[in-house]
Image: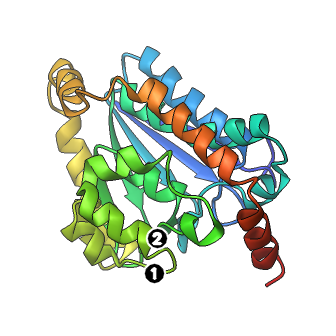
Amino acid sequence: MNKEQGTITVLVKESIAYITFYHPAGNSFPGILLKDLADTITSLNKNREVTLIVLKSEGNKTFCAGASFDELLAVDNLEKGAVFFNGFANVINAMRTSDKIIIGRIQGKAVGGGVGLAAACDYVFATEEASVKLSELAIGIGPFVIEPAVSRKIGIPATSEMTLNATEWKTAAWAKENKLYNEVFGSVVEMDEALDQWIQRLASYNPEALYEMKKVLWQDTDHWETLLPERAKISGRLVLSEFTVNALKQFKNK
């Protein structure tokens, strides 16, 4: 996969695996990149030398712009719609079922599926530039696939506030106050210094205890294996609606 199609890279340093994703369109995710990310997270379960995963993206301005807009525009039947929205479902389920603690490094804005990725991390470091938005209702769909992960982290009231204010950016301070982020820093340098110290300390803990803690943190989510694909079908149906087709056309022509 070349740079124009996007990339997923993995660096294992001591007991920590750093997964970095990139796409030229704001670190957005086409389907093939989502599959690669889900497969990468799952494959790391087999590496007993790895205790922690750090999930990050390239660049400074945008952590993740969500799903590929070009692929969204190309959806023209229910089957394609379900497959398209299942991309993030598979990634979230891979993060949920991973036996590694996953730490998010959020250096810039996160939209839609990018918010879902942050929510599916077990602990999150962010900068003050890492604003968040759930914009799906503005184009006639909704954050159905990522909602369980987001609501689990920040609760139904805050999820409702984000979802219904689909054009409004929420600040990193708001995200920290509502527990989407755990730590927020004034700069990338400050964040990375704190992140490095924190993961080194966490990596020194008993790996078996971390694994058991991961299971506890995600208890009562086994039903997501079927829930998220069901939610993907809802979005896949709505994206074909006249309202959404017209909204997407208007957005593209801006």
Seen as rendered, the residue at the extreme bottom is 254
**For the C terminus, which image quadrant?**
bottom right
Could you say which quadrant of the image residue 72 lies in? bottom right
Q: Where residue 118 sits in the image (x, y, percent)?
A: 40, 53
Could you say which quadrant of the image residue 183 lies in? bottom left
13 or 202: nearer the viewer: 202
153 or 232: nearer the viewer: 232
Instruction: Calculate the distance from the C-alpha at mark 1 to the C-alpha at mark 2.
Output: 6 Å
- Identify the residue at image location x=64%, y=54%: 67
- Identify the residue at image location x=48%, y=53%: 56
224 or 172: nearer the viewer: 224
Label of residue 168 in the image? 1
How crowded pointer 1 is (Cα within 10 Å; few <14, some 14-19, many 20+) is rated as some
Compared across the picture, whether 109 is left or right of 59 comes to: left
How crowded pointer 2 is (Cα within 10 Å; few <14, some 14-19, many 20+) is rated as many
- Secondary element under disc 2, as helix, strand or loop, is strand
- Secondary element under disc 1, as helix, strand or loop, is loop
Q: Where residue 121 sits in the image (x, y, percent)?
A: 35, 45
Looking at the rendered structure, the kind of residue marked 2 is: Lys
Position of residue 53 relative to residue 173, above or below, is above
Compared across the picture, whether 193 is left or right of 20 comes to: left
- Identify the residue at image location x=26%, y=31%: 218
Compared across the picture, whether 219 is left or right of 4 comes to: left
- Identify the residue at image location x=84%, y=80%: 253
Seen as rendered, the residue at the extreme front is 242
Q: Quick check: marks 1 and 2 in contact, CB under 8 Å?
A: yes
Compared across the picture, whether 101 is left or right of 212 comes to: right
**For the N terminus, which image quadrant?**
top right
For mark 2, what is the residue? 133
